[in-house]
Image (cartoon, coloured by chain):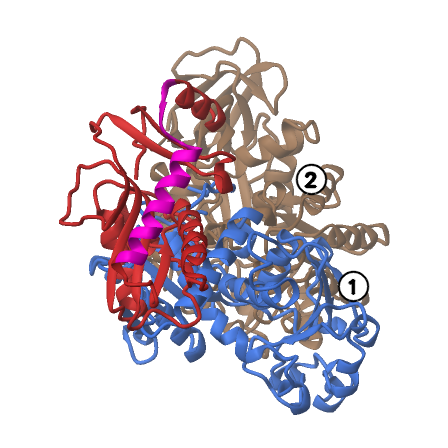
Amino acid sequence: MDTEQQNQQYESDARPVLEGPDIARVLTRIAHEIVERAKGADDVVLLGIPTRGVFLAQRLAAKLQEITERAIPVGSLDITMYRDDLRMHPPRALARTDIPGDGIDGRLVVLVDDVLFSGRTIRAALDALNDIGRPRAVQLAVLVDRGHRELPIRADYVGKNLPTSLRETVKVQLAEEDGRDTVLLGAKRTSPGGE
Amino acid sequence: MGKILIRGAKVLGGEPQDVLVDGEVIEAVGTGLSAEGAEVVEADGKVLLPGLVDLHTHLREPGREDSETVLTGTRAAASGGFTAVFAMANTFPVADTAGVVEQVYRLGREHGYCDVQPIGAVTVGLEGRQLAELGAMHESAAGVTVFSDDGKCVDDAVIMRRALEYVKAFGGVVAQHAQEPRLTEGAQMNEGVVSAELGLGGWPAVAEESIIARDVLLAEHVGSRVHICHLSTAGSVEIVRWAKSRGIDVTAEVTPHHLLLTDELVRTYNPVYKVNPPLRTERDVLALREALADGTIDIVATDHAPHPHEDKDCEWAAAAMGMVGLETALSVVQQTMVETGLLDWAGVADRMSARPAAIGGATGHGRPVSAGEPANLTLVDTAYRGAVDPAGFASRSRNTPYEGRELPGRVTHTWLRGKATLVDGKLA
Amino acid sequence: MQRHLISAADLTRDDAVLILDTAEEMARVADRPIKKLPTLRGRTVVNLFFEDSTRTRISFEAAEKRLSADVINFTAKGSSVSKGESLKDTAQTLEAMGVDAVVIRHGASGAPYRLATSGWIDAAVINAGDGTHQHPTQALLDAFTMRRRLVGRDAGLGQDLAGKRITLVGDILHSRVARSNVDLLHTLGAEVTLVAPPTLVPVGVESWPCEVAYDLDGTLSKSDAVMLLRVQRERMNAAFFPTEREYSRRYGLDGDRMAKMPEHAIVMHPGPMVRGMEITAEVADSDRCTAVEQVANGVSIRMAVLYLLLGGNEPAVTHTRTEEK
C-alpha cells in the first residue's frame, strides 16, 4: 500500500476532534496566556519543533504580535540528533534548526509542538537547547496533549487535552503542510502515529 | 607392466575406437580389439588425446616450496591431463646452472607423475646482464633446450641478440617474456578504460608489442628462432602473424586465462585476477582465440603460477602476480575453443601436445595416438559440467580465478608411458 | 546509501543531495557555542591512516568528535604495519577492539574496497582516499562548496548542480580527487571539463562522463567553477611536463586568467596548494578562491556522512548498486 492510499484509508477511519476554527481559537487563547504569564512577553522566543511545531510557532508569533504590537522572535529547533531512539531506525533526514538572531541567552523560550505524548521529544529538545544557550526559563506549548507520559514532563500551554488509548493515533494536519487544518483521532495501524 | 585396453574412446574426438596399450607403448588402435589379459578401461565415448605438454609451468622448487614443489606441481599436472611440463627458471636459486636444472629434472623423474623438463635462465640470476651457461645446461643430464628469463624480460637488445645467436649452436630456443620494463614501471593492470577508472597503474599493450616486434626482427636478422611467451594482446597477434608471413622462425603461446578472462574482473580488486601479463579486453580475448585457431599462435601454455594464500588475501598492489592453471587448462580450452567451434579435438591435441612438444624438444611426447607410439595419453569426459572447487586441487596453491565458475570437461585418466598417473579423476 | 562509502560513483543523485542537505544542517552546529552533538555517543570510529595526511585525518577527527563518537587514531608509521603486518591483520585487530567504522586512507587503489568486501571485518568502511582511485568525501565537500556559492546556502537545499560548468585543471592521471569529482559532479547534473597536458590525462578517459581539453584559456569563460589540482614537482622528473615554468605558463591560474572567468565563477583547490605552480598567490588569496571554505565544509560533509552511515540501526536511504560478495 502506498502512502497516499494509507492516508486516504486513515482519514476515512479517523474522526476529527479539532477543526480549522477550533485550532485558530485555541492558538489565540494560548497567545493570550503567554502574554499574561510572561508579563507582556517582552523576552519571549518561540521555537517550533519540526515539522508542524514550526508552523504553530509562526502562527502563535503572529497572534502575539497582534496582541503586543511587537515582533516576536520565532525559530525552529530540530531534535533529530538528540533523540534517544536513533539506533532503532535508519538515520532520519535532518530538519532545520533556526535560532533567531539575538539568540536565547537570558530569554524565555517557549517550545512549540503539535502533540505531547511520551515526552521524549521534549526531553531531546531540552538537551538541544542546552547546547545552544542558556534561557532564563523554558516553557512548553502544545496543540494537543494526549497523555501517556514516559518522562516527568508537562506542558505550560495546552490547546486541548485529549484522553486517548495507546491503540489510538492522533494526527495533526496544518494548512502549510497538509492543505487543511484538523486534528484527527484514529485507530492504530501497523506503524505508530502520534507524536 | 601389463596390458590396458581403453575401450570405446573417441580418439582425437573421432569415432569410438579401442586402444590397446602394452607396457610403455601403444600396441594397437582399432575396433573390437581383444581384451584378453588386459585391464579394461571403459572410455564410453570420452575423448582420448595424447598426453598434454605444458611449455610454461612454475614449479617453485627450489626456494618457494610453500607455494608448490616438483611433487605437488607434477601431481597437479597429471590431474590436468599433462604428461610433460617445462619448469620455468625463476626459482631460488635461479635455474641458471647445470646443477639446479639437474636437480629439478631428477625430482621429476623420481616422483613419476609427469616428465619435468627444466627451462634454463637466459641470463645469470635473471638479471639481464650476463648470459648464463646455456651450453652447460644443454649438455647436463637435464638436456635443456628452452631458455627463458620468464617473469622478467630480456630487455637489453644486445643480450637478446646474443642469446638468440648462441643457442643456434645446439638447437635451443629463447622464450621471451615480452614486457618493456620502463613502460610498465608501477603497472598493475591493463592500461585502458578500466585502469583509468580504478586508478591502478596502467600496463600498456605496447609494452608487450614493442618487445615482440623487436625480437622477431632480431631473430630474422641472426637467423635464429624465438618463442614468445603468453601473448596477451590483439596487437601482438598482428605482429606474430606478420613475422610468420615473412618467414621468420617465431612461435607463440597463449594462456588459458587470456582466452577467457578480461580486465573487467579487476573491478573487484580481488588479486586472484592479478597476473602478468595482465588480463586484457574482450577484443584482445577474441583476437587471441582467432589466432590460436588459425595457427598464428602455436600453442596453449598454462603459465601455472602458484602463490600462497597470504600473497593474494591482501590489497591489489601488495599481491603477487599469477594464477594456477594446470588443473583447469583443458576445461578452459574446451569452453573457449572447442565449444565455440574454433578448434576440434584434433586441433586441441595439436596446440596442447604435439606443437609444444615439438617447440620444446620433448622426446616421446606429443606423438600421434597410433600403434608403436609411447603410451602418453589423456582421457577426457567432455560431457562433464561442474563448478571449479580449488579445495580439490592437487596443487599446493589455490590461487585460481575460476573458483565457483562452471567449466566443461574433466580429465579422468592420464597415462605416462603406459603407467596410470590419474584413474577416474584420482591420482594414482 | 550503502553500508560503506567507497566511491563517489556509488552514490545516487538522491543520496548525494541528502548528504549535502544534511551537511548544511551540520554546518550550523559550527556556529553554536557548543559545537557538539550527542548523536554518535557510544560508537567507536578508527581513523586508519596508512598514508600521511594530517589535513584529512584532522577533518575526520573533528567531525567524529563533534558527533560524540569515540575516536581511535591509527597511523601506520612506526606501527606494526611498518614491520610487515598486513592490512587484513591490522583491520581485524582493530575490529576485535569493537570498532563500528573504519575511516581508511591507503596508498593502494582499492584497499578500502577490499576491506569492505573481503569478509575481513564487519565495520562500516569510509574511504578517506585510496591511491589514485577515489576520495569521495573530498568530492562531496567540493560539491557542497559549489552548491553554496553557485546556487545558494538556503536556495540550494534539495537541489543538485544541474547545468553548472565545472573545469578541473591539473594532474588528472594521478588524482583521486579528479576521479571522485567527475563521478559525483556528473551524478549531480554538472558539466565537467578536464584540462591538463595530455601526459597527465589517463588512457581510457574517453569512458568518463566529461569533456577533455588541453587548452585552459579556451575553457575559462565557460566555467562556473575552476578547480585546480595539485601538481607534484617530482612529476617533472618523470617527463610528464618539461619544466615547472612551462607548466604554470600553460596551466597555472594567475590574475589575468582569473579575469577571463565569469564574475560569479569561483576558484577551488583541494589543498595543499603549490603557490607559483598551479596557482599564483594573487589568486589563492582572492575572495573568489574557496580553499579555506572547503576545509571548513569538509568537517560538515564528514559529519553528514558519519551520521547517515552510523546514526541509525542501518544506513540511510536504499542503495542502488548491489555489493559484490
Chain A, hue in figure: red
Q: Residue at x 32, y 48 (%)?
A: A30
* Chain letter belonging to callout 2: B
Q: Residue at x 60, y 53 (%)?
A: C159
State the image coordinates of residue A98 (x, y, percent, origin top left).
43, 62
Write down the chain letter for disc 1.
B
Circle 2 sits in a helix, a strand or a loop, which is it?
A: helix
Q: Which residue is mark 1?
A: B223
- Of all chains in the rendering, the one displayed in brown is B
Q: Is residue B185 left or right of residue C110?
A: right
Q: Looking at the picture, tell me which residue is in the foreground, C138 or B411.
A: C138
Q: Position of residue B59 (x, y in %)?
A: 43, 54
Residue highlighted by disc 2: B289
Residue C210 visible, this orientation = yes
* Magenta stretch: includes residue C233: no
Pick whichever of labels 1 and 2 is earlier in the sequence. 1
Question: Looking at the magenta stretch, what is its main secondary structure?
Answer: helix
Q: Is residue A27 magenta?
A: yes
Which part of the image, by quadrant, shows the C terminus of chain A? Answer: top left
